[in-house]
Image (spheres, helix red, strand yellow):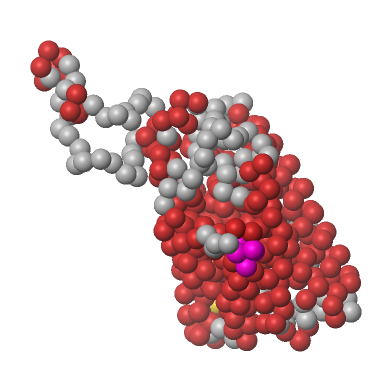
Amino acid sequence: MRLRFALLLAPGLLAFPAQAQDATSAAISSGDTAWMLIATALVLLMTPALAFFYGGLVRAKNALNTMMMSFIALGVSGVLWALLGYSLAFGEGSAWVGDLSMALLRGVGLEASGSIPHLLFMAFQGTFAIITAALISGAIVERMQFKAYLWFIALWGLLVYAPVAHWVWGGGWLADLGALDFAGGAVVHVNAAAAAIAAVLFLGPRKDYGRQAMLPHNVPFVLLGAGLLWFGWFGFNGGSALTAGEGAALAFVNTMLAPAATLLVWALLDLGREGKVTAVGAATAIVVGLVAITPAAGFIAPWAALLLGAISALPSYFAILWRPRTRFDDSLDVFAAHGLGGITGALLTGIFAQASWGGTDGLLFGNPGQFVAQLVSVLAVLLYSGVVSYLILKALSLFMPVRATARAEAVGLDVVLHGEEAYTDGEGAILLLEHERPNGTVPASVQHPHSVTP
């Protein structure tokens, strides 16, 4: 459904006269526009929500650094999307990448794109580019230089995210193949997870990984983040219909049902294994269910959404149990949650999709070719994103340190890389200049136990 509207964008956007805008204004629906304004804001909220989800899962000394990795994407990815990314994703171009006809938002105005203003369509798509970059950070928290991370998500957004978005939503080769991805199973979640794998392999495990427990420092933050992510996801999936009609209603309901089923199955697995249901597990289950329903949200019946959500719990649950036994330090289980959740959802889309619900019939309804198209899309995105992400990190390492020093890891990245702490003791103290101190010494009362020189 997104593709149908995206294909309307490519022709003739290099220039759009004012009189043409007047002629097309009647095609813009105020109801659809109102819904898409809300949906865009909801998706933008998901990136701060992700910051709380990820931030609560790390140790206190790295909480701010982890949250900043999400927040900074609002700036880096948001600006680059407007300058170049949108054109590379939705410009006419080739089967592999768009052109630069809409660079600097040239030709992107208030003319109709489907039934909403073109400028609003661009902004909605930009929120996806932002959160996809932020998702990668969960795999490499507590050990990456912040400057290198900024360069990485900037280059990744242009060299990986934009081309993959073009393949699926901008009229590229996967769209021609018939791959279905309603709101970003492959474009967002598999894409980010493949980059996360590459980053983990490049950086290696954290300094203390496997030698000491690295427990979440604030589980209520994790629950808050998961709840806000679910709230924002109604815009993520429901907004991907690009109208306020039946497609949005279907995606909205499926976004409610699938994570509920994932959460129930996850809780039952926890009860059967340990006799207790953990809060972190419940929050993770919600995210896995949301990820899994994303590619299918507007293509499958509600009963299928329940089944998809229930099935998606299994691979992610057991992968999260297995991963800590390895040296693969995907710190916050980006691949287990977003990679396996996205892969499972994309493949099940090829099974459960029904033409009567807005998609193309899948394997269960007599079209095995749809499952093949889904499999090809997953493998292509995994391979491309993984390889190019690794090459970007390798190139960056030639110009700057990519990994934080062992000392910075020990002290905590909050103080070393940001000069701040999430939590402090007391109300601080007055620091005196050296020439104002008695005998030139620093009073013990103002010496900070974690003070370091970056």
> Which residues are the magenta region?
268-272
**Horizontal arrangement in the rendering, residue 104 relative to residue 196 (left or right):** left
Q: Residue 169 sits in which quadrant? A: bottom right
Vertical arrangement, residue 362 with respect to residue 96, above or below:
below
Vertical arrangement, residue 17 with respect to residue 99, above or below:
below
Q: Which secondary structure is most common in the magenta stretch? A: helix
- Residue 193's x, y, as percent? 66, 51
- Residue 45's x, y, as percent? 46, 64
The residue furthest top is: 439
- Residue 312's x, y, as percent? 69, 65
**Residue at horizontal 41%, vertical 30%?**
411
- Residue 256's x, y, as percent? 57, 77
Figure disc tally: 0
Q: Residue 354 sits in which quadrant? A: bottom right
Q: Is residue 270 magenta?
A: yes
Q: Residue 243 sits in which quadrant? A: bottom right
The residue furthest front is: 275
Vertical arrangement, residue 90 with respect to residue 443, above or below:
below
The one of 6 and 393 positioned closer to us in this rendering: 393
**Residue at horizontal 57%, vertical 26%?**
399
